[in-house]
């Protein structure tokens, strides 16, 4: 019989994977993988601030991730460093600052390993509720944003010329990403969130004829990775967060061996 | 006002296409007067007058960095002009064919899904738009697998399915070989004649400018010259900008009916834009 803690982990993990899949597709399409990494790295700083001001950690993570996204948008306005370099600075500055701040607060006992690699087996009923309510809000937001965001992803000029607002879509998408990072951090940790966003989406690409199908398949592959990873970690007694990412990678590699689908070969 | 244009627009020579003639007195879809845009203290473009009426084709030409795209973007309202005025008709529907559209392999997109990107056409409208540009058979094809000519046609169909009052074409024949270019220009003229939409076209390709263009605006940071194609070709400002030989090499593509129609009214596709193997093309 499965232990209750394991079932809680499974429920929370699948909830995160289902919202991460569709969002991850846009990260792949828009080539924002490194941007996602940067926002995830800033989550540790969010935790530090949450302890400093005694607020809910998820709120701290969301706020800091959103601020990092805003900072990048503002820095990109002026032609200085390349986006690549700006992201490198933001990612590591926020991660380092977070580590320093956590260490400077000796009265706070924080399990750093759990923050970096997740602690999915320790999720509570309240966490599951947060994942499903937050996840529903993120998916509803994405569904509402889908059309203009997809048009802006194909070509921002085209979207703007035909009456959509690509800049606004992009900013709202970043907010959704901040939400996913805040919800997923406890489960897989700041270092592995991007993997959960990107790998299932990359797996889904070869089997999807349309963007919508790819989003749905990414959610399925993500949920499958969570289940496989958790059972694997239970069997082999390995850390659960990294095991989920290893399972996602294994599914991705297996999918490469499957003959090319009709969707990919086109006509 | 900073403007030294030779404005020959008034003595536009006949013949005028019948579809356009009836709409000549209609209100402009877009009208810009003394348009100027500056960035970082430098004028990208200044002193441009532009007006597009229903059924009219206006072509912006000029070298790279001459302000063609800036002018078009300001006319569409994507950027605010720093000088001058832009007026657009109320509720103007725009169909846009962007320059250099590369769709990443990671984004699975069929021609059909591309058509629904900003519009919600029904199946009949979708088929009609594809048939009009001559790629009805490619509805389910993945956009990444189209040839240059097929892709430009798909982009045109996508813009058309919106039933636009104004069609904006930014370099519509890029990546298409010469034979294919002629076919696409033919298609653009047919679209104008049949739908009566206004067309704003941007081109840096000076070798082929449609004779069907009602007016050509030659830009080089300012309006270098403007008027009917032949007028621009002969203007001293144009020859100074592009050199003496430009007048000789610029082949204004003449209006002649050299294509056939399918039973449904679509144009028989020239083989040249899908397959150049074993063929001699003029630019090969």
Image (cartoon, coloured by chain):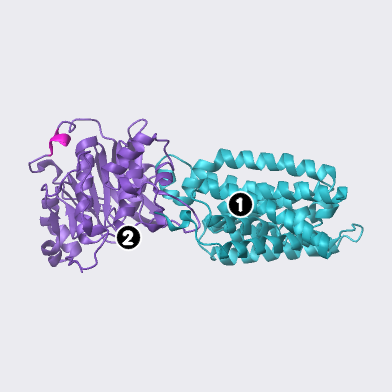
Chain colours: A cyan, B purple
Nearer to us of marks 1 and 2 is 1
- In the rendered view of the protein, which quadrant contains the C terminus of chain B? bottom left
User: Residue placed at 13% from the left, 41% from the top?
Assistant: B10
User: In the image, residue A220 lies at what x, y percent?
Assistant: 64, 50
Mark 1 and mark 2: span between their CA atoms?
42 Å
Question: Residue B18 magenta-drawn?
Answer: yes
Q: Chain of mark 1?
A: A
Q: Chain of mark 2?
A: B
User: In the image, residue B14 lies at what x, y percent?
Assistant: 7, 41
Q: Residue B177 occupies which quadrant of the picture?
A: bottom left
Left or right relative to A166: residue A245 = right
User: Residue placed at 41% from the left, 38% from the top?
Assistant: B119
User: In the image, residue B109 lies at what x, y percent?
Assistant: 45, 50
Taking the view exactly as shown, the residue that stands out farthest to the right is A107
- B99 and A200: which one is in front? A200
In terms of secondary structure, where does tag 2 sit? loop
Against B56, residue A100 (above or below) is below
Q: Which residues are magenta?
A: B17-21
In terms of secondary structure, where does tag 1 sit? helix
Q: Residue B272 occupies which quadrant of the picture?
A: bottom left
User: Residue placed at 22% from the left, 40% from the top?
Assistant: B192
Left or right relative to B42: residue A53 = right
Residue B161 appears in the picture as rendered: no
Label 2 Cα neighbours within 10 Å, binned few <14 / some 14-19 / many ≥20: some
Name the residue that disc number 2 marks: B65
Name the residue that disc number 1 marks: A218
Residue A12 appears in the picture as rendered: yes
Question: Residue B200 magenta-drawn?
Answer: no
């Amino acid at each position: 019989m499965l232990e209750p803690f394991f079932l809680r982990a499974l429920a929370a993990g699948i909830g995160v994977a289902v919202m991460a899949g569709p969002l991850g597709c846009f990260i792949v399409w828009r080539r924002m993988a490194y941007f996602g990494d940067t926002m995830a790295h800033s989550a540790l700083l969010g935790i530090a601030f949450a302890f400093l001001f005694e607020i809910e950690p998820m709120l701290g993570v969301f706020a800091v991730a959103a601020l990092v996204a805003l900072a990048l948008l503002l820095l990109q306005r002026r032609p200085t460093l390349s986006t690549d370099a700006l992201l490198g600075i933001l990612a590591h500055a926020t991660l380092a600052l977070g580590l320093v701040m956590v260490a400077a607060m000796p009265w706070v006992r924080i399990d750093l390993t759990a923050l970096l690699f997740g602690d999915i087996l320790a999720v509570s009923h309240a966490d599951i509720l947060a994942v499903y309510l937050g996840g529903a809000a993120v998916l509803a937001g994405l569904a509402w944003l889908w059309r203009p965001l997809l048009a802006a992803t194909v070509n921002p000029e085209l979207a703007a010329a035909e009456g959509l607002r690509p800049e606004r879509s992009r900013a709202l998408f970043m907010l959704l990403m901040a939400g996913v990072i805040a919800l997923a951090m406890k489960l897989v940790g700041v270092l592995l969130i991007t993997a959960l966003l990107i790998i299932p989406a990359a797996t889904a690409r070869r089997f999807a004829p349309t963007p919508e199908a790819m989003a749905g398949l990414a959610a399925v592959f993500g949920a499958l990775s969570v289940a496989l990873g958790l059972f694997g970690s239970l069997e082999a007694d390995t850390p659960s967060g990294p095991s989920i990412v290893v399972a996602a990678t294994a599914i991705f590699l297996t999918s490469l061996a499957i003959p090319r689908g009709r969707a990919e070969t086109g006509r | 006002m900073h403007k030294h244009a030779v404005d020959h627009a008034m003595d536009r020579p006949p013949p005028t296409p019948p579809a356009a003639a009836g709409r000549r007195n209609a209100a402009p879809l877009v009208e810009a007067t003394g348009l100027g845009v500056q960035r970082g203290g430098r004028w990208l473009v200044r002193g441009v007058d532009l007006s597009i009426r229903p059924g009219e084709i206006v072509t912006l030409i000029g070298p790279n960095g001459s302000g063609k795209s800036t002018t078009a973007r300001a006319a569409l309202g994507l950027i605010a002009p720093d000088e001058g005025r832009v007026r657009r008709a109320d509720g103007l529907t725009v169909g846009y064919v962007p320059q250099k559209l590369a769709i990443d392999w990671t984004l699975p997109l069929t021609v059909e899904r591309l058509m629904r990107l900003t519009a919600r056409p029904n199946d009949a409208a979708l088929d009609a738009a594809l048939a009009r540009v001559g790629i009805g058979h490619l509805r389910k094809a993945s956009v990444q697998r189209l040839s240059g000519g097929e892709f430009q046609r798909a982009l045109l169909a996508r813009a058309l399915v919106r039933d636009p009052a104004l069609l904006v074409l930014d370099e519509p024949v890029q990546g298409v070989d010469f034979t294919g270019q002629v076919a696409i220009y033919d298609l653009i003229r047919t679209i104008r004649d049949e739908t009566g939409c206004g067309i704003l076209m941007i081109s840096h390709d000076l070798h082929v400018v449609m004779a069907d263009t009602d007016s050509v605006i030659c830009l080089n940071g300012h309006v270098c010259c403007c008027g009917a194609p032949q007028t621009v070709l002969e203007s001293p400002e144009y020859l100074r900008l592009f050199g003496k030989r430009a007048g000789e090499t610029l082949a204004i593509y003449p209006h002649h009916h050299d294509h056939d129609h399918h039973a449904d009214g679509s144009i028989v596709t020239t083989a040249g834009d899908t397959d150049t193997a074993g063929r001699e093309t003029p630019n090969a």
